[in-house]
Amino acid sequence: MIEALRSTHGATVAVPEDGIMNAFDKLASQGILAEPTSAAAAAALDDLLDRRLILAGDTTVVVVTGTGIKSATAIADYMAK
């Protein structure tokens, strides 16, 4: 992975827990029940947009691979707060 990042001049993004949960909420509001760990990819997109490393008109794909059904109890607890 590191070699692929270097050879393509790519980068990685670290996102804080609150950024992940904000992205989780945003996905849920759009009808996408993602597993919170999967929402990290959407949180990274938000960060890249905020930093203008990806522009609003750019074509971007964010893969959300985990379904929230796997974390239903934890999600219910989170939503109850």
Image (cartoon, grey):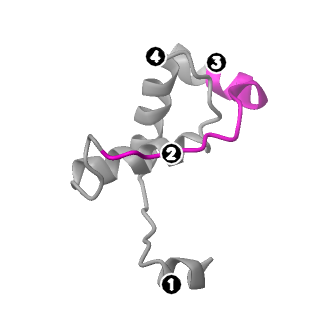
Mark closer to the chain start, 2 or 4: 4
In the rendered image, which residue does mark 3 sit on? 76
60 to 4, vertically: above or below: above
Work out how far the residue at label 3 is from the one at label 1, CA to CA, in angstroms.
42 Å
In the drawing, does residue 54 fall left or right of residue 25?
left
In the rendered image, which residue does mark 2 sit on? 61
Crowd around label 3: few <14 · some 14–19 · many ≥20 (10 Å): few
In the rendered image, which residue does mark 1 sit on? 7
Report the mark closest to the observer, 2 or 4.
2
Could you say whether the residue bearing mark 4 is in a helix, strand or loop?
Answer: helix
**Marks 4 and 2: in contact by CB < 8 Å?**
no
Q: The residue under label 4 is which amino acid type?
A: Ser
The residue at 59%/37% (across/down) is 36
Work out how far the residue at label 1 is from the one at label 2, CA to CA, in angstroms.
20 Å
Magenta residue check for 68: yes
Mark closer to the chain start, 4 or 1: 1
24 to 80, vertically: above or below: below
In the drawing, does residue 2 fall left or right of residue 69?
left
Provide residue 64's location: percent of width, then percent of height.
Answer: 61, 40
Provide residue 55's location: percent of width, then percent of height.
Answer: 25, 48
Work out how far the residue at label 3 is from the one at label 4, CA to CA, in angstroms.
15 Å
Provide residue 54's location: percent of width, then percent of height.
Answer: 30, 53
In the rendered image, which residue does mark 4 sit on? 29
Screen quadrant of the N terminus: bottom right
Could you say whether the residue bearing mark 2 is in a helix, strand or loop?
Answer: loop
Q: Which residues are magenta?
A: 58-76
Q: Nearer the viewer, residue 80 or 25?
A: 25
Report the mark closest to the observer, 3 or 2.
2
Work out how far the residue at label 2 is from the one at label 4, CA to CA, in angstroms.
19 Å
Could you say whether the residue bearing mark 1 is in a helix, strand or loop?
Answer: helix
Q: The residue under label 3 is which amino acid type?
A: Ala
Crowd around label 2: few <14 · some 14–19 · many ≥20 (10 Å): few
